[in-house]
Amino acid sequence: MVGAASNPEQVAMNDKPVLDIEGLKARLLAHREELLQEAADTAGERETVELDQARVGRLSRMDAMQAQAMSVELQRRRELELRRIASALERIAEGEYGYCLTCGELIDPKRLEIEPTSSQCIGCASQSERER
């Protein structure tokens, strides 16, 4: 465990504000539920488009295929976000939340307030982006 605080519910950030881990955990759980509900609500949109020309015209089929492709991509993005949320919740459970997975330094609380699934400090995230 890289520099975990003695109280896993709060991580002191040098002279910066204390990180509200329980509040962020609640936000992560709520966001996870929203994503799961959206996935359930839109499941039918990802089903195979019917190709029966007698029932549906060519342009309508093309529109339906485009809508299906967009729905599939949205679901892929939801699943990615769900994995990020699961990872953040796991780090909270292990007392590792709030620490950069790359360098081990504390992640600025402002960064985590904006993006609670962040797993890297801004320096390491910027470096990762430059290396892509």
Image (spheres, grey):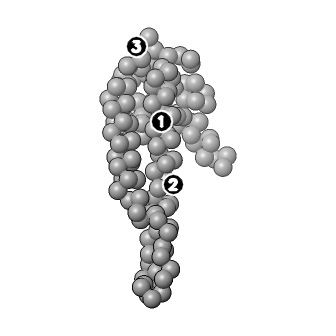
Element marked by disc 1: helix
Which residue position is annotated with label 1? 86
Residue 102 placement, left or right of 117: right
Residue name at image x 56 percent, y 19 percent: 2
The numbered mark, 2 or 1, whose residue comes first in the sequence reads 2
Residue 32 placement, left or right of 120: left
How far apart are labels 2 and 1 at the CA level?
A: 15 Å
Estimate the x, y position of residue 97 in percent, counting from the top left.
Answer: 47, 26
The numbered mark, 3 or 2, whose residue comes first in the sequence reads 3
Question: Which label was assigned to residue 7?
Answer: 3
Which residue position is annotated with label 2? 76
Quarter the N terminus occupies: top right
Residue name at image x 42 percent, y 36 percent: 116
**Residues at discs 3 and 2 in contact (Cβ within 8 Å):** no
Residue count near mark 1 (Cα–Cα under 10 Å), binned few <14, some 14–19, many ≥20: some
Q: Is residue 26 above or below residue 59?
A: above
Q: Nearer the viewer, residue 60 or 4?
A: 60
Residue name at image x 48 percent, y 36 percent: 86
The numbered mark, 3 or 1, whose residue comes first in the sequence reads 3
How far apart are labels 3 and 2 at the CA level?
A: 36 Å
Q: Amino acid at mark 2?
A: Arg
Q: Amino acid at mark 1?
A: Ala
